[in-house]
Amino acid sequence: MAFKLFPKTAKPAPSSAQVDAQAPSRGAGGKPTAREPMTVTRGGRPGDPDWIPQSSAIEVDENGGLGPSLENAALMFAHGNVTAATAALVHALDTADRNQPFVWMCLFDLYARADNRVAFDDLALRFVVQFERSAPSWDEMAPGGRHGASADAGQKAKSRSLLRGQLTDPHAPVLVALMAGARRKDAAAAQQRFDLDIGDLNGVDDTCGTLLAGALSALRRKGVVVGFRSLESTIRRLSVPLQSGNRNNRGQWYLVLELLQWASLTTQFEDRAVDFAVTFEISPPSAEPLTPLQRSVLSDAATSDAHADAAAALPDDRITLAGELKGSSDANLKLLDPDRVTTNPAIVDMRQVLRADFVCGGAIANAFTRLMAQAIDVHVVGASPIVQALLQLTGTPASVFARR
């Protein structure tokens, strides 16, 4: 189902004078003359000369408008008052601004910076209900998930538990932890969170496969969130030795059927369930739906891998800004000098930017304007939502950002 989050308002038709003013000047013979360098304003649109196409899942207002709540939050963030910025965004969700995904993304960003996992997960559930699509994952939004903004920030990112090689030890720590979580019956049992890296898991014996599938099944039914890395590729790899009629690898059959449910691959699950029933002559596990919050993290692996691929694909001559950007003479600003830019477009990597104050944000916007005035396109990658909001507030066009 598609939603039009930002409906366009009707615009009056341009006058003839405006049309003439916008038409390219023509010299002798009616041929267009060379255009003067263009000054780019906020709010580029498809069809405008300054429009930069973006591939994206999260959309922002194409006019670059932030709304009063988000502007206030960005300003508080620029001054280092994260608590006030967070409060402004929480309040915005009780207003019409809750219809703007970008407001939610900025609040996700602030919760991740504060290492507030409980509030982040609660917001993720509300996001899924509001927009009927997946929320960003903790691993994506936490500082380490933005490719290590700093050594300290990187330490805050939650690491994934590894399951690798051939799993044959039923006392393996990760397996024991999952089984213990599955057995919990207290009020906080459903609030658990597990993050598993199964990208190098090559197989399981019957005992470990049955135990692991049982633990994951119990966690799934409790509504516990489990994030996976390389879920679908691991399913394909583990499925290779499983042939209908071959009774070997029974534990691995159970595990593959369970992982298919986590991946919401319904058709494949049904096909595998029939093969299982034919092979072992018993009823296969029944399919059960995931909760909205569980569904919202299914893209963790794909998102993380996509970010890693994007990072690897960035050119070596990109402009990398890092740390806390302060004042009009911050050393990072020298990198945006048109005389030092050697590529077009200029790729500005802001994955390592922790914060920018208002003055430096304005200086960055002015630097981008100078580059674009010389017909150098600017593409900003990796800016966290709240940093992007601050830069838009200080004059950077929304169109230069790679959308989330």
Image (spheres, rainbow, N blue to C red):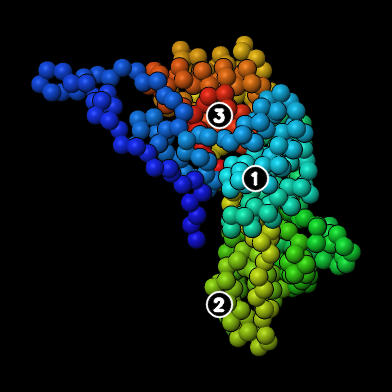
Q: Which residue is drawn at 25% across and 25% down?
A: 17
- Label 1 residue SS: loop
Which residue carries the number 1 mark?
95
* Nearer to me, 285 or 71: 71
Tell me which amino acid carries mark 3.
Gln
Q: Residue 391: where, in percent of width, then height?
A: 58, 27
Quadrant where the image shows the C terminus: top right
Residue at 39%, 29% in the rendered image: 50
* Residue 352 left/right relative to 120: left
User: Which residue, given by chain and number where applicable, does mark 2 sit on?
Assistant: 271
x, y percent for residue 126: 68, 54
Res 256 seen here: no
Which mark identifies residue 392? 3
N-term-proximal mark, 3 vs 2: 2
Q: Quarter-wise, where is residue 250 in the image?
A: bottom right
Left or right position of 137 against 26: right
| Circle 2 Cα neighbour tier, 10 Å, few/some/many (<14 / 14–19 / ≥20) | few
Direction right: furthest residue: 186
Q: Which residue is more in the foreground, 376 or 148?
A: 376
